[in-house]
Structures are given as structure tokens and as C-alpha cells.
Image (cartoon, grey):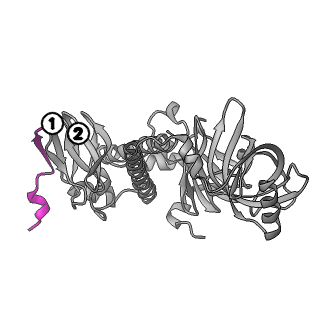
Amino acid sequence: MNDKAKIPPIVRLKYKKGELIIKQGDYGISIYKIISGKVRIFSESGDREIPLATLGRGEIFGEMTFLNRGAEARAASARAAQDSELEIWHPGRLSTEYAHMPHAIQYIVRQVLERLIRMNKLVAQLTAKKQEDAKKPAKLEEPGASQRRYYRKKMDIECIYRPVGSSPKLALHGKVKDLSMGGLALEVRAKNALNFSHEKGDKFHINMILPNGKKFAVTSKVLSTKTNPTLGTLFMGMEFSDVSEGDGRTLGFFMRA
Amino acid sequence: MAVDQQLYVYVLNEEDYPTNAVIVKEGSKGEWMYVILEGKVKVKKNTPKGMVTIGTLNEGDIIGEMALFDAVVADRTRTASAIADGPVKVGVMDTDRLLRDFESISPQLKGLIKTLVNRLRDTTQRAVNLAMG
């Protein structure tokens, strides 16, 4: 007996508004096509629902688990956002077709799928973070500033810098806009970022001459970046990751002065 | 070579790119698909707040697959830039043969793959908007 033969390949079902169609974490490889109505796709994180998409007539969902050969549980839930009629494809025949698909197409589909799974996770994380941030009362700038461990000095001095790991001969130009015992703010031409990565987490060696005439060299890690398209500048908030004892003294002396 | 042999037979030509060279430029037209034979590639997208890296690709990974599934040739606009992260060797894939392969499968399966690709395009854009917003 072949079980597959008993299952009709396509059935139509009606869902009332609010009814759950797919539950995240369940195993199932059916594919759904919306005949009428609307379906909301969302990811569940704790007791929160993170909306991912709202789909309408003619659109397909549930295809990811199928294309993943049921290797993983449903990555998201689906709920009828209106009374909806769906076509449910039992993937028996499609599975056979998939297995016979040219190898190169399978290879590409697998990569697209992996990228999509990664992007979905990222969207869920970023949305959760955004919801969390929205809950927090807006912080006032001033108390934040007073909580800073270090006093900051505003300045505008030229410096040369280069990415950690690059040739020591390389000298990019920038301006140090403020300095504290823990870090600095560096402003550079945005075009510098076309040739070398200037992103959060990147490290740079920075050399400058302080307004008191002392040389100061430090390795810093990028904490935040902000571009100003009008001025064509890139502003980076940086934290010192490596300060030699001598340079630490130079800086301490300058900051106290 | 770590690249899948059954994929390597689709490689028409090999190209070398130096560090930071642009292999594919976001917004440009193009239908070639590449497979990375050696090295690493950064995938970046342009946003109002500057370029943002959305992923790093390694040996065996493909570049430019989205354009392949756009039925209308005129719509084949690159959705992201691919930039060499160190010296890179890529294989230029036989797009005609891949398209013939794609056309050989059933309409239902084709529909699923197109859904998947569109989903990746939309989700990537959403992730970028969320990260930069």
C-alpha cells in the first residue's frame, strides 16, 4: 500500500478570521496558497508576536519548510487575518519533482533558503529589539552625560589613521572631534569607507599630536558610525582597545590639564 | 577545490578580483551569476545612512542568483553590491544553461522558488530598514 496515493494532492480549506493555520515549531511540509482572504505571518518570541508579513490572494506560504525537505520545524506561525480560503498542497509529487530537479538549481535554492532563514532571524531580532526600545522611557541627554565615566574634551585636530592589519605605510586622514580617557570621536571623509571597511567593530590605529604638542598613538574600536551625506563625512564613535602605558600617561596629563 | 563539481561544470570562465574590487554593483543591470572559487566576498547594501554589510560569502557560495529568477530581463537589477574582501577568484556561470534547467521544472515548483527568492529580497530590505531606521 502506498500511503501517498490515499492523500489528495490538493485540498481546499476555509479558515475563520483569527484561526491559526501554521504553528511555529511544528513539523509539517504542506504548502499553502491563498485563494481568498489575508494571512498574517509572524514569529513567536516568548509571549510576543513579531509580524513578518501579511499575504493576500495568490500568494504562497509554508514553502520554506518544504524546500528545506522538512529538516527543520516551521520557522514562523500563520494566522488568518480575515476569513480566508486556502489551497493546501500535499507535497508528495512536488517532493519527487524537487529531488529530480537539476543539481545546480537545487544548489542555488538551498543557498537562497539559508540566506532567507538567516535574514528572517535577523528581522525577528531587530523587531524584538525595536519593541523593547519603544517600551523604555525616553532618556534625557543630560543625566546620560553625567553618568559617563570620563570627561570629554571637544577638539578639532588632524590625525592619521589606518585599519589594524593594513600596511604601516598606509595613512588615511581624519579629524578627532572629541577625546576622553576611554575613547574618541573621529570624523573622516565618507569616501575613505569605499576602500576600507569602516564599520562597527572595526579597529584602527590612530596617531595624532595633542594640542599640548605631545604625540599620542592609540588603537580604537568603532562603536557607532554616522554618515552625513551632505558633508560627505563619516563620524565614528570609538573606544580605545589598546593604549600603551606611556600614551595613557600622555592622555591623562592632557585631560587633567 | 572545495567547489561542488556538479556546479563547477557550469563555470564558463574564471575571473580574479583584487581586494575591495566591486564584483557586482547594486542598482546596475546584470544577469551573470557567479560562484566563489577562492576568497571571501562582502555583500553590501546602500542606505540613506551609508553602506551596510548584510553578509559575508565564502568559497562555494553564489553571487547574483536573484537576477536569474526574474522572468523579465529588464527587471534584472542587482539588489546588493558584492565586494572582494581580499583577493577573490570567481567562476562565471553559464546563465543560459541555468535558465534552461530552471525552465525544465514544473510551473508549481518554479512558483515556489520564485516565492522564495522574492521573500529573500523583501526580507533583506526589511532587515536593512530595521537596522538603519
B71 up-or-down from A114: above or below: above
Give the crowd class for mark 2: few <14, some 14-19, many >=20 residues within 10 Å: many
Helix, strand or loop at mark 1: strand
Q: Nearer the viewer, residue A123 or B22?
A: A123
- The chain under label 2 reads A
Look at label 1 and name its amino acid: Ser
Mark before the other along the chain sequence, 2 or 1: 2
Q: Position of residue A128 (x, y in %)?
A: 37, 49
The single residue placed furthest to the right in the displayed view is A213
Q: Nearer the viewer, residue B67 or A98?
A: B67
Helix, strand or loop at mark 2: strand
- The chain under label 1 reads A
Q: Nearer the viewer, residue A73 or A7?
A: A73
Q: Position of residue B125 (x, y in %)?
A: 47, 41
Look at label 2 and name its amino acid: Val
Q: Is residue A54 left or right of residue A219?
A: left
Magenta segment: A1-17
Q: Nearer the viewer, residue A56 or A88?
A: A56
Name the residue tied to disc 2.
A39
- Mark 2 and mark 1 residues within 8 Å of each other at the beta carbon: yes
Residue at 43 percent across and 60 percent down: it is A103
Name the residue tied to disc 1.
A84
Residue at 11 percent across and 41 percent down: it is A15
A39 up-or-down from A205: above or below: above
Q: Position of residue A22 (x, y in %)?
A: 20, 51
Q: Quadrant of residue A99?
A: bottom left
Q: Marks 2 and 1, Cα distance to the nearest angstrom?
A: 8 Å
